[in-house]
Image: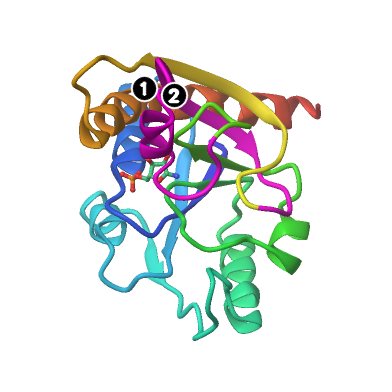
Amino acid sequence: MKPKIGVLGSGKGSNLAAVCRKIETGELDAEIGLVISDVKDAGILQLARDQGVPAMWVDPGSQKGGRLSDAAIMEITGQLKNAGVELVVLAGFMKIVRGELLETFSGRMVNIHPSLLPKYKGLAAWKQALEAGESEAGCTVHFVAAGVDSGEIIEQARVPIFDGDTADTVHARIQQQEHELYSRVIGEVLRRLRAGN
Ligand code: GRF
């Protein structure tokens, strides 16, 4: 049986689309068990449905500052478990993962962040790099731990920043790399999990 991944996202879902393509071509040996979003009309949910993948919205509750309600944490954890998910993949999930969800999938949850961590955590990281005058930016896949954009770094991809770049051009260049890097690392982590290390 192919290992199942669960994807959590809040946005347009271009990383999910890339993962689906790599599954289709056989480059990634996995199956998407479930896609969950905290945003009812997120592109990622539509994309999942178009791909015939189970997709659901979970009410994040009304807490501020990226916090999920306790009920949302329980619901997401339960749904991922029921779907038989081995690895949780965060793809533009704008909520902080904590509590039962983090504990249940400890060592089995990865995130992709659009910077060369540990530099530029948080929002619009590509813009932070550009405004700081960096000559390169990139993306990082890391295990998820308590704390925003923290946790063991698994792999990074670098892109140059050119004179005349805008936040949009840098972001687009990073996303191209994300779409290659994420599936490759997901495959690697799944192999390691299956091998028991
Ligand atoms: C990506 O840039 C990722 O690095 C960040 O959120 C964005 C998600 O984009 N964590 P998409 O929804 O996969 O297009």
46 lies above or below 162: below
Find disc 2 in the rendering and name its residue. Answer: 138
Report the magenta residues as a range. 120-147
* Residue at (53% x, 37% y) in the render: 120
Can residue 23 be seen in this snapshot?
Answer: yes
Choose mark 1 or mark 2, whichever is in front: 2
| Mark 1: secondary structure | helix
Q: Quadrant of residue 71?
A: bottom right
> In the rendered structure, which amino acid carries the disc numbered 2?
Gly
* Residue at (26% x, 35% y) in the render: 167
Q: For this view, does 158 lie left or right of residue 145?
A: left
84 lies above or below 189: below
- The quadrant of the picture occupied by the C terminus is top right
Q: For this view, does 167 lie left or right of residue 193?
A: left
Find disc 1 in the rendering and name its residue. Answer: 177
Marks 1 and 2 close (CB-CB < 8 Å)? yes
